[in-house]
Image (spheres, helix red, strand yellow):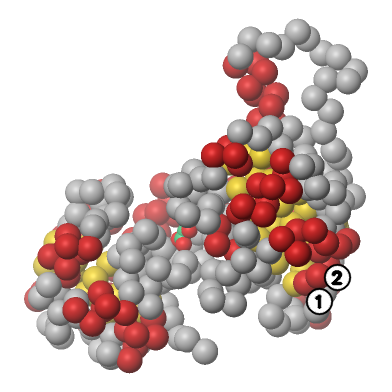
Amino acid sequence: MNQKKIKVAVTRQLPEPVETRMKELFDVNLSNSPYPLNIDELYEIVYDCDVLVPTLGDKIDKNFIKEAGKNLKLIANYGVGYDHIDVLSANNLGITVTNTPNVLTEDTADIAMALILSIPRRIKEGVKKLEDNEWDGWAPNALLGHRIYGKRLGILGMGRIGQAIARRAKAFGIQIHYHNRNRLPVKLEEILEATYWESLDQMLARIDFLSINTPHTPSTFHLINARRLKIMKKTAYIINTARGEIIDENALTRMLRSKELAGAALDVFEKGNEINPRLKELDNVFLLPHMSSATIEGRIEMGEKVIINIKTFSDGHTPPDIILIN
Ligand code: GLV
């Protein structure tokens, strides 16, 4: 494929340095929308393109892929999560799919750690008291939270982000437990001082904080369902910086309301930005608008990865971040 002629369609406005570089390298159709395009707009931009650069919120399903146009050869996702793309259908039609791993690991782990620290220590409630001019001064019983040091953190999904959270949590004196499809090498477990639980249920019964760091796939949808939430201690907190669909949000809301769980800190929700209003009302929750990877550095590096994937692919090589479905 001749690089000058490669046609790239981008579905969302990207950081300016990324767009500038793309303009230099490709025949690129950029988007000026910060929000997802509707299906007709998506068809319009992908028509006659060799490469589509979608991102979170774009529904790249089987039907879309089938109708996307005969030139489409690469879907270079801007983002690490690819649960919005039907990779198998793309591959079946000879379309390669890539993502942007690694570059947002540390940023996401920072926010997960911030949430682990914030929710047991009631940071949101403290800030609100001040902002509402309701603070009367220090008092022995005011805003008492729970100690973080010495507690047990269970990490569900011990990939790159899970491990980056474990490193941080260990430095705070937290005991690391994890459940993962595959056990980590013993050397790594020793470095992280991490205890492996083959049974998720057994781990859930013993931990004080649960951090969700597994991708959203058909087998992780509602993995944390009402039954599993009930296994957890009433004093436990849940932190989710992965995907909302992994937790049954309605069951979680019910249990937080009835104090069967101590609290939750969530950066992601089951239905995007349509958050259960009952969840939003609660004091024992700390909610963020899906911003755990939101750093300028990370977003530029994500763009750089997209560009590298497109360039290696168009040069006839296997792109470094090809998604292989196993
Ligand atoms: C962010 O959530 C991403 O998947 O990149």
Q: Amino acid at mark 1?
A: Ser
Q: Is mark 2 within 8 Å of ligand 1?
A: no
Instruction: Report whether 166 appears left or right of 302.
Output: right
Residue 313 rendering spot, x and y as whole percentages = 28, 82
**280 or 19: nearer the eye?**
280
Q: Is mark 1 within 8 Å of ligand 1?
A: no
Check disc 2 and report the residue beneath it: 202
Instruction: Report whether 49 appears left or right of 188.
Output: left
**229 or 101: nearer the eye?**
229
Label 1: how many Cα within 10 Å (few below 14, some 14–19, many 20+) = few
Residue name at image x 68 percent, y 63 percent: 225
Asked if residue 2 is positioned above or below residue 94 in the image, the reply reads above
Residue 94 rendering spot, x and y as whole percentages = 28, 91
Quarter the N terminus occupies: bottom left
Looking at the rendering, which quadrant does residue 139 occupy?
Answer: top right
Residue 18 rendering spot, x and y as whole percentages = 28, 56
Q: Are marks 2 and 1 in contact (CB under 8 Å)?
A: yes
Instruction: Report whether 139 appears left or right of 275.
Output: right
Residue 116 appears in the rendering = no
Mark 2 → mark 1, Cα distance in angstroms? 5 Å
Looking at the rendered structure, the secondary structure element under dot 1 is loop
Asked if residue 276 is positioned above or below residue 76 in the image, the reply reads above
Label 2: how many Cα within 10 Å (few below 14, some 14–19, many 20+) = some
Check disc 1 and report the residue beneath it: 199
Residue 111 rendering spot, x and y as whole percentages = 60, 47
Q: Amino acid at mark 2?
A: Gln
Looking at the rendered structure, the secondary structure element under dot 2 is helix
